[in-house]
């Protein structure tokens, strides 16, 4: 794995940014926009994926990074759960649901891989150099 110098270089963060942009786009129209609780929850969960990846990376230690990646992974699962509500309420069509769900699931797989890599690595992080 290449050495990451910025959180913006992390593939999971890049994909989480795309997911967040798409969540905002679909949640600003129609009935979805008026369901303030669900709209705010799914947006917050999407933002949390990005934020936890960034914050964990900037902490500079592998163990802390893994902890924050775990939170990002949980937020991604939260997005997927909220997506079912949006589908059940007919706020999204099946195709949009599948697209967002798939992207969130892909983010989870990338995060899991990164967590495994960090757990198996002997490198403790930038702050220990």
Image (spheres, helix red, strand yellow):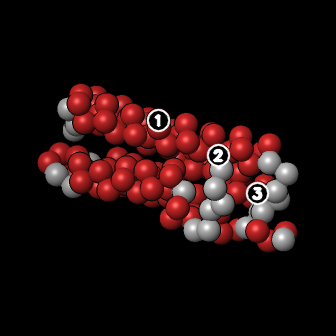
Q: Residue at x 51, y 50 (%)?
A: 12
Instruction: State how far apart marks 1 and 2 are (Cα).
Output: 14 Å
Mark 2 is surrounded, within 10 Å at the Cα level, by few (under 14), some (14 to 19) or many (20 or more) other residues, namely some
Query: Hey, which residue is sitting farthest front in the picture?
Result: 2
Q: For residue 90, which quarter of the picture? A: top left
Q: Where, by quadrant of the figure, is residue 91 drawn?
A: top left
Decide: marks 3, 1 in contact (CB < 8 A)? Answer: no
> From what the image shows, is residue 117 above or below residue 63?
above
Mark positioned earlier in the residue sequence (1 or 2): 1
Q: In which quadrant is the C terminus drawn? A: bottom right
**Residue 39 location (% of width, % of height):** 32, 51
Q: Circle 1 is placed at which residue position?
A: 105
Residue 4: x %, y % from top left:
62, 62
Percent x, y for residue 104?
Answer: 44, 40
Residue at image coords 80%, 43%: 120
Q: Are marks 1 and 2 in contact (CB under 8 Å)?
A: no
Q: How far apart are marks 2 and 3 (CA)?
A: 10 Å
Residue matched to label 2: 114
Q: Is mark 3 on a helix, strand or loop?
A: helix
The residue depicted at 76 percent of the width and 68 percent of the height is: 126
- Residue that label 3 marks: 62
């Amino acid at each position: 794995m290449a050495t990451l110098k910025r959180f913006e270089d992390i593939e999971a963060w890049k994909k989480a940014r795309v997911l967040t942009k798409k969540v905002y786009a679909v949640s600003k129209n129609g009935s979805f926009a008026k369901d303030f609780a669900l709209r705010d929850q799914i947006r917050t969960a999407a933002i949390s994926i990005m934020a936890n990846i960034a914050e964990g990376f900037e902490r500079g230690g592998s163990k802390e990074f893994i902890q924050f990646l775990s939170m990002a992974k949980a937020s991604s699962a939260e997005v997927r759960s909220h997506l079912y509500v949006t589908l059940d309420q007919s706020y999204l069509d099946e195709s949009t649901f599948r697209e967002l769900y798939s992207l969130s699931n892909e983010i989870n797989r990338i995060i899991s891989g990164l967590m495994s890599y960090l757990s198996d690595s002997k490198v403790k992080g930038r702050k220990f150099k």
